[in-house]
């Protein structure tokens, strides 16, 4: 089956530093989404980016579909960015038939 | 206001019992899903529904039965509970290429 591998598994930063998170997947993805999971467990969608580059706030995602990889860049990290970042893909046509497969995540800790 | 409501937030059950996890979404989406996250595994897809019809089922056990009484409701009935069913169960919905997740129900089976 398809697999999603994320690296690094954990990352510790000083506040203000940038972070680069990687996601590699084993089969073609028609849908790719980055999520933030808070220490309390809630899941927040950050970006949907099946190809190309997308920005929102301090986040930039770049997905190279042919190479089956995506990255999430967090600039000027803040302590409130601490949590787990999850990459998820779907290889269906999306919409109502979507079935996300998740990676194990990158646990980010930002120190003040 | 929360757009996807899951009830209860926490649930403790005894082995062999039956529980229903509630999910309601107020995003106007036609597609709804259930996912499970246990301590040692990544988030796993369980079911997808569209317009109240089952689209995909990746749950091997028939003990897990989704129920959709209304377009914006997708409950999950779990029967004959086992300790291995202990996990956080997330409901999600989507329109287009983005899925939005509820806060989850944390289930502990003793």
Image (cartoon, rainbow, N blue to C red):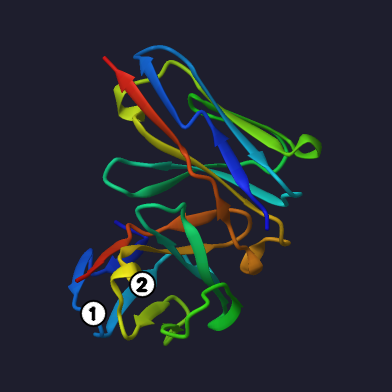
Taking B5 as reference, is A18 left or right?
right
Question: Residue B90, position in %: x, y?
Answer: 39, 62
Q: Say if B11 sits above or below A29 in the image.
A: below
Q: Quadrant of residue A6?
A: top right
Q: Secondary structure at mark 2?
A: strand
For the N terminus of chain A, the image quarter is bottom right
Cβ atoms under marks 2 and 1 closer than 8 Å: no
x, y percent for residue B108: 23, 66
Out of B34 and B59, give the one closest to the viewer. Answer: B59
Q: Please report the residue visible at 42 percent of the width from the left and 87 percent of the height from the top.
A: B69
Q: Give the position of the C terminus of chain A as an image quadrant.
A: top left
Q: Is residue A45 left or right of residue A95?
A: left
From this view, report whether residue B97 is shown above or below residue B5: above
Which label belongs to residue B15? Answer: 1
Tally of marks: 2
List the residue tagged with mark 2. Answer: B23
Q: Is residue B107 above or below residue A109?
A: below
Residue occupying the point 61% across, 45% down: A4
Task: Report the chain holding disc 2.
Answer: B
């Amino acid at each position: 089956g398809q697999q999603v591998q994320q690296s690094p598994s954990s990352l510790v930063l000083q506040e203000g530093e940038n972070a680069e998170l990687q996601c590699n997947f084993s089969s073609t993805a028609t849908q790719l989404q980055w999520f933030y999971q808070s220490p309390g467990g809630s899941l927040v969608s950050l970006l949907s980016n099946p190809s190309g580059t997308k920005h929102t706030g301090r986040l930039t995602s770049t997905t190279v579909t042919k190479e089956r990889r995506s990255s999430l860049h967090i600039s000027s990290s803040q302590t409130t960015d601490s949590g787990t970042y999850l990459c998820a893909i779907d290889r269906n046509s999306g919409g109502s038939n979507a079935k996300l497969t998740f990676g194990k995540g990158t646990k980010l800790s930002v120190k003040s | 206001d929360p757009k996807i409501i899951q009830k209860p937030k926490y649930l403790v059950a005894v082995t062999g019992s039956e529980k229903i996890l509630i999910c309601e979404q107020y995003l106007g989406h036609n597609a709804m899903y259930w996912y499970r996250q246990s301590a040692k595994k990544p988030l796993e897809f369980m079911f997808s529904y569209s317009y109240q019809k089952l689209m995909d089922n990746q749950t091997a056990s028939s003990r897990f039965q989704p129920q959709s009484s209304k377009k914006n409701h997708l409950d999950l009935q779990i029967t004959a509970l086992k300790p291995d069913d202990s996990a956080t169960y997330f409901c999600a919905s989507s329109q287009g290429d983005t899925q939005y997740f509820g806060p989850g129900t944390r289930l502990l089976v003793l």
